[in-house]
Amino acid sequence: MNSTYGSAFVGLIVSATLYGATILQVYLYYRNYPKDARFLKVLVFTLCIFDTMQLVLCVTALYWYLITNYNNPSVLDQLTWSMELQTDCNGVIALLVECFFARRVWLMSSNMYLVTIIVILAAIHFVLGIVFTVDSFRLVTNTEFGNLIVRWVTSAGIGSAAAADVIIAGALCFYLSKSRTGFKKTDSLISTLIVYSLTTGLITSLIGVVIVVTFATMPNDYIWLAFFWIDGKCYVNSCLAALNSRESLREKASPQDGSFFQLSRVPGNSTRISSANSRVLIFHHICFLIIYSYTQNACRSLVTALVWR
């Protein structure tokens, strides 16, 4: 029990905690970014729906095993529909998030081959997740997870997702490093973005590696399942954190009070520009025009891809 439903229970507690962070980030997103593009709003809404569905299915499964069938040990080896369907929710979440970050890689690099590889790996993870679900409905007990085909499908699917995450993190860090300008403020912003990229990419990829190793070595235990549940929540929160961090990045990129670029007052009427976004946008265009010839489009690609969108 400790290595099966005990592990799953711990994973459920951690994933439920991360789900609370998801709800908070969704609220902050819709409050702070009402003018975002429609596809981003739809993306956030879709991620929230599938994240909620996944948690509900996990709770339903454990409730059926531990409460409904309490003192009925023979049921513990059986598979229930909610346990089988929850994997597809994480598959959809991972596909959406990896495509979101693939778009950022495209905006930074315009490298079609690199983006295609990321999308293909994400699609492989999604498709093999569906194959795993279909095979799960054919299995009679969870002890059959040790089946060679099921083990191969799971390892290949999760491994593809982990590889996509590593490529995304590496690509963003590489192209951000190439965007260094020599200007202290801009380079500081780039360093912050590199840390964000490494954090969001490596966490999910490391968890993916743990899932592959634990499933390959202990397929009949639910240690891998606990990490799998946590992995889905990390995907959602990494995407939401990337979206919600834009405001702090804008503030970090904005000029200091009293500087020439602030443009907070207009001589004569002393009219203050009412919108903070307008000041940031004006600052962005002026800085771009001044340092364009020296930075060879580095600031333009950086700001366009990761801050101003």
Image (cartoon, rainbow, N blue to C red):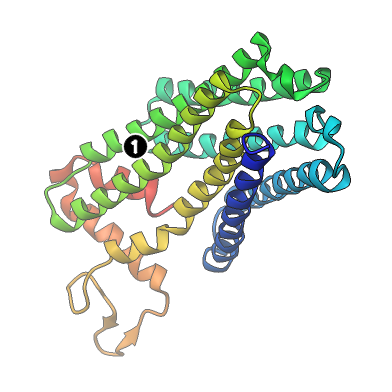
Amino acid at dot 1: Leu
From where the camera sits, is residue 219 visible?
yes
Residue receiving disc 1 = 172
* Front in this rendered view, residue 145 or 290: 145
From where the camera sits, is residue 38 visible?
no
The answer to whether 160 is drawn above or below residue 109 in the figure is above
The answer to whether 254 is drawn above or below residue 166 in the figure is below
- Element at label 1: helix
- Residue 261 position, x and y percent, is 21, 69
The quadrant where residue 249 appears: bottom left
**In the image, what residue occupies the spot 39% across and 37% down?**
202
- Residue 156 position, x and y percent, is 56, 17
- Residue 129 position, x and y percent, is 66, 25
**In the image, what residue occupies the spot 73% across and 37% down?**
86
- Residue 281 position, x and y percent, is 35, 63
The answer to whether 303 is drawn above or below residue 3 in the figure is below
* Front in this rendered view, residue 171 or 8: 8
The quadrant where residue 231 appears: top right
The quadrant where residue 50 appears: top right
Tell me the crowding category of disc 1: few under 14, some 14 to 19, or many 20 or more residues within 10 angstroms, Cα based. many
Q: Residue furthest top?
A: 148
Q: Is residue 83 left or right of residue 264?
A: right
**In the image, what residue occupies the spot 80% across and 37% down?**
82
**In the image, what residue occupies the spot 24% across and 85% down?**
267
